[in-house]
Image (spheres, grey):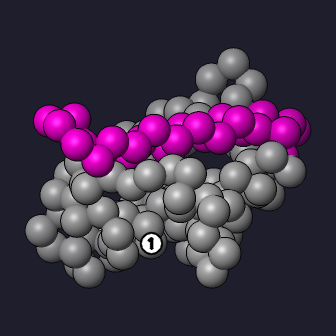
Amino acid sequence: PAVLEQLGLGAALRQLVNRFQRLHPSCQVKLHLTKMGVLPQQLEVISYRLLQECFNNIGKHSAATQVNISLISADGKLKLIAEDNGVGFNLEEALAKRESFGMAGMRERVALLGGQFHVESRTEGTKRGTKICIELPISK
């Protein structure tokens, strides 16, 4: 994306959040970014695309009213956390859907970079919602 090249990852993610909030005004998004320093361009692009897919899924399926996004750079890793208070879903069913590539594509992208991908989702109780944690190694 041009904004990523011109303004960097932080500005690109803020723009992504603003666009999501315009499309989903009933959903409040909090974005937490730590000082990341210089990251490899491929890592920035993949982080942007992963968060873009998180927002696509939240907008289409979750009916969330709150979303928290964190991007943290520490100990040679970039950690992306996307958490919502939506309706949640059954993870096994979502990954088994043949016509749906979002979650599987995210998992695959992370695996190709030697990262870790973890999803928790609850459909019942007071702690409903979904949390996606992604850790990617920062290789210079």
Quadrant of the drawing holding the N terminus: bottom right
- Residue 95 inside the magenta-drawn segment: no
Residue 56 appears in which quarter of the rendering? bottom left
**Does the magenta-highlighted stretch encompass residue 134?**
yes
- Asked whether 102 or 11 is in front, the reply is 102
Residue 31 place in picture, x, y as percent: 34, 47
Q: Is residue 83 above or below residue 77?
A: below
Three-letter amino acid code at the position of disc 1: Asn
* Front residue (pair 130, 52): 130
Identified at 53% across, 33% down, the residue is 72
- Tell me where residue 103 appears, x and y as whole percent: 60, 60
Quarter of the rendering occupied by the C terminus = top right
Residue at the spot of label 1: 56
Q: Is residue 3 left or right of residue 106?
A: left
Total marks in image = 1
> Is residue 15 visible from the viewing direction of this image?
no
- Mark 1 neighbour class, 10 Å CA radius: few under 14, some 14 to 19, many 20 or more: some
Tell me: residue 9, above or below residue 36.
below
Q: Is residue 86 left or right of residue 39?
A: left
Boundaries of the magenta span: 113-140
Residue at left 16%, top 58%? 65
Instruction: Please identify the quarter of the rendering in which residue 36 is found.
Output: top right
> Does the image show residue 32?
yes
The residue located at (86%, 51%) in the rendering is 112
Residue 11 in the image: x percent, y percent?
47, 61
Please indicate whether residue 99 sits to the left or right of residue 114 in the image.
left
Residue 104 placement (x, y as % from top left): 68, 61
Q: What residue appears at the point 66 percent right and 75 percent down from the top-left corner?
A: 98
Q: Helix, strand or loop at disc 1?
A: helix
Please tell me whether residue 75 is drawn above or below residue 77 in the rendered image.
Answer: above
